[in-house]
Amino acid sequence: MQKIALMTCLGLALLGCERSSSPGNATEYYETRGVVRGFSPDRQTIEIQHENIPGFMPSMTMPCIAHNSREIAGLKVGDAISFRMAVTQKDFWIDRVKKIRREEVHVTEPKSTPAISANDGDRLKEGDQMPFFNLTNQNGQPVSLNTFHGQPFVLTFVFTRCPLPNFCPLMSSNFDELETGIKTGSGALAKTRLLSVTLDPEFDTPEILKKYGAYYNADPEVWTLATGDKKEIDVLTRAFSVYRQTKGGTISHGLATALIDKDGKIEKIWRGNTWKPGEVMEEINQRGE
């Protein structure tokens, strides 16, 4: 859990946490409360908007796996619950799920928002051109689509306050591995660059992104971490159908990673967190220069 603890300490200014662990136990436990916002079709996964977890992470809406599916069998959307979140270096789940009164849960009701796009044609697809963007990198310098002209690059979305091992930290660990492959590779792979765009621009300043990048040994010549105007980032998240909401102190988000060629065409899009650095490198090598 050392890595998670270090990530949480990267200037995130959160309060002391209420957690329990024992020496030699690789699992950290966090008691929290939340509101049920949805279920997967098989009801194995429950989407919860949880409260701030002091010392660990801000309020988020995210999918969770219940250790015992019977604990969530009788729940419905809108129910208030208390539960325990268990986190290891590679995974997390919830247990001890109990229904409670809504007044006991301190989260704001999300405002109804329209779908990311009313027209499926507006959602970026493989073969489309990457939309233009103007952002700021971890060194406070401007970065745009033109910055990567003539070089393939891999784009993903993260935010520094996300400590769950199979969400943003996994994306950044994958980029760390990709960076190593780029530095030791040849041909198109050696020319490829990496771009992590924050989903939390109000918090993730260039200074914080620089510290975050240093933790992952990000070489700014290869790996750019970018923040910018919220509207500018909204354009990118909508284009890639990455749900993002930061109202009322809650951060909700999805995951998408894309390979863009040297001319700005989107070659491949990976959704979710199951992609591996090796398959991205293989994709780059197969497409060549």
Image (cartoon, helix red, strand yellow):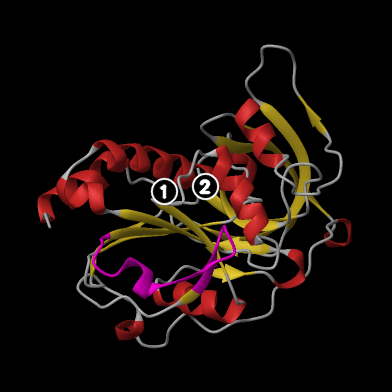
Q: Is residue 1 visible?
A: no
Foreground residue among 273 and 200:
200
Looking at the rendering, which quadrant does residue 109 occupy? bottom right
Instruction: Say which residue label 1 marks.
Output: 273
**The N terminus sits in image quarter:** top right
Callout 1: SS = loop
Q: Are marks 1 and 2 in contact (CB under 8 Å)?
A: yes
Question: In the depicted view, which residue is nearer to us: 186 or 108?
Answer: 186
Q: Is residue 286 left or right of residue 109?
A: left
> Residue at 23% across / 67% down in the picture?
150
Q: Which mark is residue 167?
A: 2
- Asked if 99 appears above or below 116 in the picture, the reply is above
Q: Position of residue 38 (x, y in %)?
A: 57, 61
**Quadrant holding the C terminus:** bottom left
Whether residue 141 is in magenta: the answer is yes
Task: Examine the rendered structure and indicate whether residue 199 appears above or below residue 135.
Answer: above
Identify the magenta region. 135-152
